[in-house]
Image: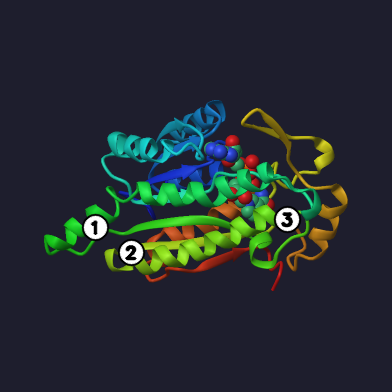
Amino acid sequence: MADLLKNQVAVVTGAGRGIGAATARLMAAEGARVVVSDLDAAPAEAVVAEIEASGGEAITVAGDVTDPAFPDRLMKAAVDAFGKLTVLVNNAGYTWDGVIHKMTDAQWEAIVDVHLSAPFRMIRATVPYMREVAKAEMAAGNKPEQRSIINISSTSGLHGNAGQINYAAAKMGIVGMTKTVAREWGAFNIRCNAVAFGAIETRLIKAKEEGESISVHGETVTLGIPQQARDVLTMMIPLGRTAVPEEAAGGILLLASPYASYITGHTLEVTGGYGI
Ligand SMILES: NC(=O)c1ccc[n+]([C@@H]2O[C@H](COP(=O)([O-])OP(=O)(O)OC[C@H]3O[C@@H](n4cnc5c(N)ncnc54)[C@H](O)[C@@H]3O)[C@@H](O)[C@H]2O)c1
């Protein structure tokens, strides 16, 4: 157990599996108390059990990030459990791919909702516990505590990606949102950064042929990318390989840590060099 995030309380959305789960484990190992939030309660509870077994502290708050009432409930649960909130990682999401001429409004809206509108509502829901608390600390003549928000973007947003017009638009939108939060809340010592991932080995980039899926508002959406696309993608990565979720979590931890105390408004590319 190390202490890069000692005294920090982190909310991580989509933390039941993949990158979010690795981030929750790593942050807890670095001393943060962690709120493991996910649509699916069972995997989130399993992550909490692992954290507790390693001597860390965590709770589960299950819910859908696209439910407009959920962000307030989530932030309140974090503060009720751990007394404060200092880190938010907007990570939850999935892909629902389709070429432009076949993309439905439902497909477009669902992906923009989960990757853009939900993170906005999450950020707004931190106001009483981050912005207002920092303001009060300043009014009392103190330097506000370290607080930070990390939004998850993608190379599909930064460079575009055929078959992902909904996802690419949302993932680039979050870069603009990140810079805006950085500008508005920098004065309160609240940093806001994004991490754009390339190919991280989770069910999102598994071979589509393996057939993992997510159920969204009664609709079953197949996740993953075709095996051929995986092969081409890997060839375009300078490091010559995809990453494990722990390497993705490392990028998030870096931005939440005190070593990033003067970094805000930045989009960190954790891509193995893809797209440079
Ligand atoms: N894996 C990659 O290569 C890659 C690349 C770029 C960006 N990303 C982004 O990283 C983030 C994490 O993805 P991952 O690869 O770990 O996928 P994942 O499917 O392994 O994990 C995502 C988690 O988010 C949860 N989730 C999905 N919709 C939700 C909702 N509406 N409310 C609450 N929770 C919800 C899922 O239940 C799941 O546990 C996503 O934002 C994704 O777009 C991933």
Q: Residue at 78% x, 59% y: name it.
A: 162
Going by the picture, which residue comes out furthest to the right? 228
- Label 3 CB less than 8 angstroms from ligand 1: yes
Report x, y in % for residue 98. 77, 49
Q: CA distance from mark 1 to mark 2?
A: 10 Å
Q: Find disc 1 in the rendering and name its residue.
A: 134
The type of residue carrying mark 1 is Ala
Q: Label 2 near label 1: C-beta < 8 Å?
A: yes
Secondary-structure class at tag 2: helix
Closer to the camera, 28 or 268? Answer: 268
Q: CA distance from mark 3 to mark 1?
A: 39 Å
Report x, y in % for residue 109. 62, 46
Q: Find disc 2 in the rendering and name its residue.
A: 185
Secondary-structure class at tag 1: helix
Going by the picture, which residue comes out furthest to the left? 140
Q: Compared with residue 4, is residue 55 higher up or lower down, i.e. above or below?
A: above
Residue 242's label in the rendered image is 3
Corner quadrant of residue 110? top right
Q: Residues within 10 Å of mark 2 (few under 14, many from 20)?
A: some
Q: Earlier in the sequence, mark 3 or mark 1?
A: 1
Q: In the rendered view of the protein, which quadrant contains the C terminus?
A: bottom right
Q: CA distance from mark 3 to mark 2?
A: 35 Å
Corner quadrant of residue 202? top right
Report x, y in % for residue 34. 41, 41
Q: Residue at 12% x, 64% y: name it.
A: 141
